[in-house]
Amino acid sequence: MRSLALPGDGTTRIRLALYFTKGLGDVVAAESAAIVPASVLLQEGDRFLVVAMTAAEAAHIGGRARTIDDARLLVAGPERINSEDGFAALCAAAARRVRRILAPGDGEPAGPCSITLSARSPVWRESPAWDPAPILARHFPGADLRATVRSPVDLRVQADEDKVHIALNLWSRPIGKRGDDGPARPGALRRTVAAALLRLAIRDVDPDVTMHGVYDPFCGTGTVVAEAARLGLPVFASDIDERAVQIARDQLAGELAGSPPGAAGALRHRVFAHDVRRGPPRRVSARVVVGNMPWGKQVKVDGRLALFDATTLLTGHLLRDGGAVAFLTTSEDALIARLRRQRLEVFSRRIGLLGQTPAIVMARTR
Ligand SMILES: C[S@@+](CC[C@H](N)C(=O)[O-])C[C@H]1O[C@@H](n2cnc3c(N)ncnc32)[C@H](O)[C@@H]1O
């Protein structure tokens, strides 16, 4: 975390913007409150939350959060912006604040920075349209507006229609991308979404049930089970693809290497090749099932229905004595209908991911 020139009595609160995948705000709010119980939730947007906490507490969020894509210091807004002049005033306020934070006392300009514009139906596209770029360039001289790599000072300008805010990075990398330094894992689920999917599955489940373990029958590279292992839960993971199974094994071994000796997850984990259409696997005691189902072109349409039948059968089998499931899928209706036939209580929600709106379908025993 950068050393911030903030009032240093340790009790003064700063405002943080927490960014997340659309549709997961409640999971992020719960995680933030669990890490910093004294935090205060000030505002809820559908892609960010504003929370108040001390700088030291913000450092805890940066070190521990799993579901949050990024946490930044709010330097201006969120404010309703109705004109170019209003946007210029917001930028001027942000620039003053950034200068005070980075060069306390002498008021020197903060130096070059990168700026990311994250905009949904932004106010500047309304009629008459105007361009935010020259205004940003005026207030942040030398700013790189097309940066693909963060400068040490990186600002995010987020516009949700006419509500705009500007936030300053606290770390050199977004917290949701920490530890992503290994080789790229094609098809891997975004780590923060995997963490949220898992938390949604276990959130209303009795801890005795959770301690039987978590099973991902479509584990791919193992992103979901790595999160479960981090929580100290026994894990079971399988995939039809042998190469994916090996990557998942390696990823899990890396995760478990850091667990305390004797932790439940370290004692019990099993990663194996298995085609879900061949029926429930043997020797899986988990009663929580979490997975990112094959998407779109990964499975032909006729094969997809067979896969949903098999997944539902597997769910019914593992949840016969109670438990819960959460699947990420692009075929929400087909899965919901089948899970309901198993007499399970079913809920779903859409999230925004990679330009699509897949659903998280959750089910639990009544
Ligand atoms: C969307 S990917 C999961 C990605 C994973 N969550 C990750 O982070 O890497 C779906 C996975 O389902 C697997 N799959 C497809 N058909 C399957 C089947 N019949 N049985 C088991 N796994 C299957 C694919 O090999 C693929 O790895």
Image (spheres, grey):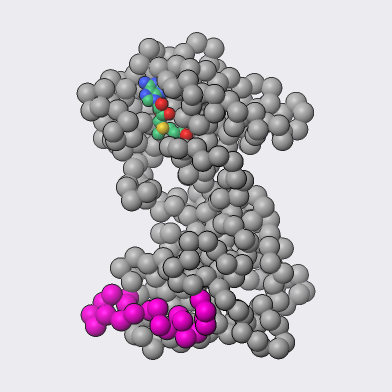
Relative horizontal placement of residue 105, taking residue 46 as reference (left or right) = right
145 magenta-colored: no
Please tell me which residue lies in front, 59 or 205.
59
* Quarter of the figure that contains the N terminus: bottom right
Q: Position of residue 142 (x, y in %)?
A: 52, 79
- Relative horizontal placement of residue 359, taking residue 76 as reference (left or right): left
The reply to whether residue 337 is in sight is no
Determine the residue positioned at 48% across, 66% down.
147
Residue 10's image quarter?
bottom right
Q: In the rendered view, does 132 fall on the left or right side of 109? A: left
Residue 142: say if magenta: yes
List x then y, in percent, for residue 342. 34, 22
Depicted 311 relative to depicted 44: above or below: above
Frontmost residue, 79 versus 210: 79
In the rendered view, tell whether residue 182 sits above or below residue 216: below
Q: Residue at x 44, y 52 (%)?
A: 21
* View quadrant of ligand 1: top left
Q: How far across and down, in percent of the image, does residue 358 sit? A: 34, 43
Report the residue at 47% width, 86% height from top.
138
- Compared to 307, does 83 lie above or below? below
Count of picture labels: 0
**Quadrant of the snapshot with the C terminus:** top left
Given residues 72 and 139, the one toward you in this image is 139
Percent position of residue 7, x then y: 72, 77
Viewer-proximal residue among 359 and 322: 359
Instruction: Name the residue located 57 percent from the left edge and 76 percent from the top edge.
Output: 112
Question: What is the span of residues highlighted in magenta in the rendered image?
Answer: 123-143
User: Could you tell me if residue 14 is visible in this image?
Assistant: yes
